[in-house]
Every structure is written in structure tokens, then in C-alpha cells.
């Protein structure tokens, strides 16, 4: 039996965001895009089998709008990550523990896993994160404090870190 999928696209102060999920949890989110169509396209091929529903995602839409509006928000949502490896899941779980407005290094994440030499593998796992903001991979930086890579671009990573730092000062 196929899993019923739901999706939505909605506007924030930074642009259109897409969300795809199942009854088990969130499958994919996008960073803000210029149009609803771009956000929907970034949700991937599985969105073709999904039904549009804003109600399905409860208060997630309001929390994401608040987040992009510069407010401190938590994302304790259930995740549905069927294609993720055990290593990726562990990296993402640890990344979700990084407090709002703070950063940690790739080395720190690897050390939390008991795999101190796995910084590159941590970076590769974070590059495959399908749930930006929910799994806050933008909070992981290089040891020297350099931003490192980000699926939404280094400028977006820098902006998100600035946004969170600004919110923690309020």
C-alpha cells in the first residue's frame, strides 16, 4: 500500500517555501524561493504523488513564517527519512541539538558521534539534508569559523546565522 503524501507551498517574508510530508513525518522542506512553482519543484519527484494540503502541517507553516521573520522558533517535528543511512540519521539528530543562534563545527558533530576523524563524512551527510531549517545544518561551520558549504548557498547560510544571532539579542 502506498504512503499518502501531502505538500504545501506558502509565502514568507523571504519567499516561497515548500513542505512535503507523510503521516510518519516531514520528508522535505525548501529554503525560500522566488515563486511557489520553484518551491514545489524543489520538493522533488515525490510531490507528483502528493495532495496539496496546508492543514496537514498544523502549525509548522506559522513557525516557519515566524522563523524567517526573525523570531526564535523550535522545530520538534517528526521526520520521515526512509532513504537516509544510519550515519546520516545520526549526523542529523546531533545537528538538531545545536541551540538556536549558536554554531558548532563539523569536528564537533563527528566527535559527538564518537568518530573524530569523520568531518568530511559529516559534511557529506549535511549536504544531503532534505529538511533545511528543521535540521539546522546552517549552524555547522568549519573549525576556523569559516562558513563552509550550504545547499542554499553561502549567502543564505550567512543570512540565517545573522537572523538567529539578531533574534537572540532581542
Image: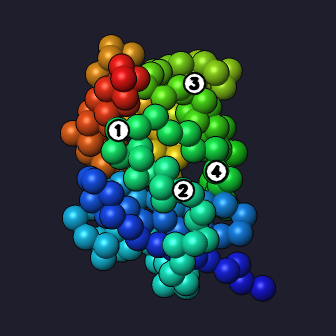
Q: Is residue 106 above or below residue 149?
A: above
Q: Are marks 2 and 4 in contact (CB under 8 Å)?
A: yes
Q: Earlier along the polypeptide chain: callout 2 or callout 1?
A: 2
Q: Is residue 42 left or right of residue 58?
A: left
Q: Earlier along the polypeptide chain: callout 3 or callout 1?
A: 1
Give the residue number, with chain letter if any, for mark 1.
70
Alpha carbon separation for disc pair 2 and 1: 15 Å
User: Tag 4: Cα neighbours inside 10 Å, few (<14), some, or many (≥20)?
Assistant: few
Report the mark closest to the observer, 3 or 2: 2
Q: How is the image coloured?
A: rainbow
Q: Residue at x 27, y 59 (%)?
A: 15
Give the residue number, with chain letter if any, for mark 2.
60
Q: Are marks 3 and 4 in contact (CB under 8 Å)?
A: no
Report the mark closest to the observer, 2 or 4: 2
Q: Quadrant location of residue 33?
A: bottom left
Residue 144 in the image: state x and y as whole percent.
33, 14
Amino acid at each position: 500500500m502506498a504512503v499518502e503524501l501531502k505538500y504545501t507551498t506558502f509565502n514568507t517574508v523571504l519567499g516561497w517555501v515548500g513542505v512535503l510530508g507523510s503521516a510518519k513525518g516531514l520528508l522535505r522542506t525548501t529554503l525560500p524561493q522566488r515563486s511557489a512553482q520553484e518551491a514545489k519543484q524543489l520538493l522533488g519527484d515525490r510531490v507528483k504523488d502528493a495532495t496539496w494540503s496546508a492543514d496537514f502541517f498544523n502549525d509548522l507553516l506559522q513557525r516557519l513564517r515566524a522563523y524567517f521573520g526573525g523570531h526564535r522558533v523550535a522545530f520538534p517535528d517528526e521526520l520521515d527519512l526512509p532513504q537516509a543511512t544510519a550515519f546520516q540519521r545520526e549526523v542529523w539528530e546531533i545537528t538538531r541539538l545545536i541551540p538556536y543562534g549558536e554554531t558548532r563545527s563539523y569536528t564537533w558533530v563527528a566527535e559527538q558521534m564518537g568518530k573524530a576523524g569523520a568531518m568530511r563524512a559529516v559534511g557529506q551527510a549535511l549536504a544531503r539534508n532534505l529538511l533545511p531549517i528543521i535540521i539546522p545544518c546552517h549552524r555547522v561551520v568549519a573549525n576556523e569559523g569559516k562558513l563552509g558549504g550550504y545547499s542554499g548557498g553561502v549567502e543564505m547560510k550567512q543570512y540565517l546565522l545573522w537572523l538567529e544571532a539578531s533574534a537572540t539579542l532581542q
